Image (cartoon, rainbow, N blue to C red):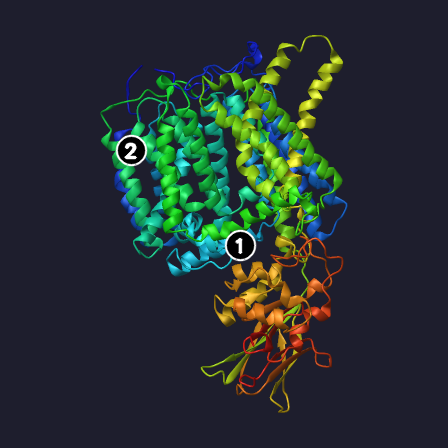
Amino acid sequence: MRQDIVPIRLPTASPSWRNRPGTAGTTGLPGRAGGDVGGPVAFPLIALLSSVGTLAVATAYAAGREGWPDLSALYWPGQLLVYLPIALRAYSPRLARPAEGFALLLLLFVQQTLLFRMYSPLALKYPDELQHWRGTVNVIQSGTLDRANYSLPPAVHYPGLEALGGAVSESAGLSVTATAFIVAALLHLLLVCALYALCLRIRADWRVATLACVIYAANPHFMFFDAMYIYQSLALPFLLLAVWALRLLRLPGRAAGRWVMLLIAIGVVTVSHHITSFVMVALLGSLAAAGLGRSRPGRELRPVAAWLVATAAVLVWVLLVARDVVGYLAPVVAHLGDSATGLLHGQLGATAPGGAPLVEPLDERLATIGALGILAFLVARGSRDLWPERHAEPWTLPLLGGALLIFVAGGLRFVASDGAELSGRASTFIYIPVALVAAIVLHDIRRRGLDHHDTGRRGLALLGGAAPVVAAAVILMGGVASGWPPAWDRLPGPYLAAGFERSVDPQGIAAAKWALSALGPGQRWAGDLTAYTLLATIGDQNTVRDGGVLFDGRGADAAASSFVKREDIQFLAVELRDSVQLPASGGYFPVDPNAGRYSSPLPRTDLAAPDRVAGVSLIYDSGDINLYDLRGSAYDG
Amino acid sequence: MTVELDPFAPGWLVTVAVAVPLLGVADAVGPRPLAVLGFAANLTVLGVAGGHMLLGRAGLSAVERATVALALPIAVLVLGTIAAAAFRLHLDRPLWAALVALVAEAAAVGVLSRRGQPSEPRNPRRWRPMRPQGGRGILWGTSLTAAGAVLAAAVALSVWTAGRQSYPVFSALSAMRAGGAGRSVEIELTSEEAAPARFIVAVAVGSARPDSITLRLAPGVTWRKTVPAATSASVTVVAYRGTRSRAPYREVHLAPRGTR
């Protein structure tokens, strides 16, 4: 059979018998495993160790809920105990079987999925998940995909996840919450499998594929954000499957089936998530360009066809269905432009207007920088090593180009005023090539180390043995520290003002449910960040993001009246706990020009200002939450 | 290159092809446990047979086949549902059951139709499963059992502490004008206190003397009352906690309408 995979090979010395990579077969699986020292025993012990780590994190979560401050310190040791044994085993030359390598990945998936869900094991609390919970409920209740989702308007035009969730919930008779738990876990598993399959296809070496997946699992958003019940979680694995199917087209036979697989993957990405679909077009475009850039005998036209199909699909979808996505994303692009302009004027990151302060603890900031530094070093070295292979393997250049974007992501943290979030979001995509290049380099480093390990210098050998442990620990800590949740939100606990999931409590949920039952869906509301989240998701209300002008204590002045009329505000939600707590996330409102600048909570008298405005009705009072009816009042003119 | 017959046994495939529609019917209209079974079985058939039909087995690793078997049912539910919505079909359980059954049947028939044709060679490189060697079975079993027990303890601890996490207790009082012309007011008081609590609810319409109602609410119980009130009259509702309290515990008020 013709060998169609051209693995990217490093120009290295021949590997020793202990770490001989698999023969470059169609899947890179070895015919016979190499040495098997410690293999059978290691996996169960690693499973036990990492499970103890999960228990430690669960204990830290419990400490957060119960107020046991001493035990909350178990969080970081637990995280390290989950990750390090698996990472070190994946790096070890004693890892001798692909089955064990993949079992390690499954083990890591199980542990990290539990770490994520144990934060809130009985209910959805993450605002992003609540948005899609609302969308799924809407699909089930209406039997259509076009019912408005006020909490996330673009999701109506990217209804892939809601379609999937609705189908599973209805068919299996599960609650939407249980469905979200199961579907999110399955999609996360699919992401791991798809990444492994893609790396295996590109590199044809199961050790590299295993290592790449382990490195990717330490990216800032892998464990939490990318494991959520959100539309990106559906699109991301299918993005990888599209590239994988494109790679499969190099094999002889079955071309029609592989094209169908490719088209299916492109279709799912297109209808599921805007950003991922744009990344897909860019990625397939880079692969197409790389294929076209070769000399005529080896020129590849299939990536060009795939790119044309993907571009057409995305364009048609955006122009005919998701026409609002441009308006949705425009503020983000404009914000980036403003940040770049600010940079030219000497305003870096958090010093720019509207920028949130860098509130991460110093050690976490150092870990973030350390992780970026280690990965950047590996990418730089990988670029140097892989550069000669660009003629033999056309995907080398796109791979390196993607990996080098880690420098852009790193810079984004300092350039943009909310660069940490943007950098974290971008890392979901950028870390795919980064992880693969880093894995290739690490595999090579380990191989070279083994070839020279008997030089007799014990000190250096010891140092060499400690280096992977330290590097893995820094990469994981940096990833977790720079991802979600932030430091103040890392453990569950009591209510925090403007604290995203930490603000989701029974009182807020009760107010949102009351709004839906008493007023019906789609009423126009202003409120703080928590009200914005809960009213729009659980309450199915139409909330605005920039209602701060109604909380300045000046009542129905010209600015407030103008705002109410312009935005057609009917109701106002006031969270009185905003008068006793500073906003945990930096701002009280979704769009808050004073974010990061509050030195004291909002004055209680300011929050009670609507009580003094003629014609305003206080229609709901639960102690901490007041809901007002502004219709016909002085606000309404 | 060796040529071998497709490894899927014909009897198995025929059984699947016949069973799929039945499972679909069970999924669409059957009682819940049977419906779930039918749905899951047809999704499995769809994934395995669909992957086999599209990509075959040659050259694919076990992980890749499993990945396709997981991805295809998801893709069919996503794209099929969106297509059905585009045709203005009502999205419900029978539709999803029919969708999954149809595609699963097509995949099974697709695999059946390839019977008798020479298929690609199977991937000669197979994963050797991990098995304990040299009497290490006890260590394996003990370690894995302990790992499972530790994980179960972690989950139990999380569920237990999340279930008993204490939040501040509260009660919510609300009032909304109701009726076609808003000539009445609906009052609700929901108790989320830690224990059954007594309340006095005073309702004042316009300048009339307030009516007081004494009630006792268990946690999670909502008390409702509708009182007549003209839209031109203001309404104030005050809830007092206990029977002797003079300080309002909760208070809502409705401004008169049409006065501005």
Report if residue A385 is visible in the image.
yes
Q: At x 35% / y 34%, what residue is drawn?
A: A261
The foreground one among B229 and A312 is A312
Residue B112 is situated, as x and y percent measured from the top left of the image, at 25, 32
Query: Which label was assigned to residue B12?
Result: 2
Gap in Å between the C-alphas at discs 1 and 2?
A: 43 Å
Which residue sits furthest front? Answer: A345
Amino acid at dot 2: Trp
Comparing marks 1 and 2, which lies closer to the viewer?
A: 1
Q: Are marks 1 and 2 in contact (CB under 8 Å)?
A: no
> What residue is shown at x 63% (from left), y 68% (from top)?
A550
The quarter of the picture where residue A110 lies is: top right
Disc 1 target residue: A130
Write the residue at 52% across / 36% down: A429
The residue most toward the top is A455
The chain containing the residue under callout 2 comes to B
Identify the disc placed on residue A233: none
Q: Position of residue A90 (x, y in %)?
A: 58, 25
Residue A49 pos. (x, y %): 65, 32
Looking at the rendered structure, the secondary structure element under dot 1 is helix
Q: Quadrant of residue B213?
A: bottom right
Q: Residue at x 36, y 42 (%)?
A: A313
- Left or right of A97: which side holds A614? right
SS at circle 2:
helix
Binning the other alpha carbons within 10 Å of mark 2 as few (below 14), some (14 to 19) or many (20 upward) gives few
Is A528 on the left or on the right of B85, as rendered?
A: right
Q: Chain of mark 1?
A: A
Q: Amino acid under label 1?
A: Leu
Q: Quadrant of the C terminus of chain B?
A: bottom right
Residue A315 vertical placement versus A629 (above, below): above
Residue A81, position as x, y percentages in the image: 67, 33
Q: Which residue sits furthest bottom? A: B208
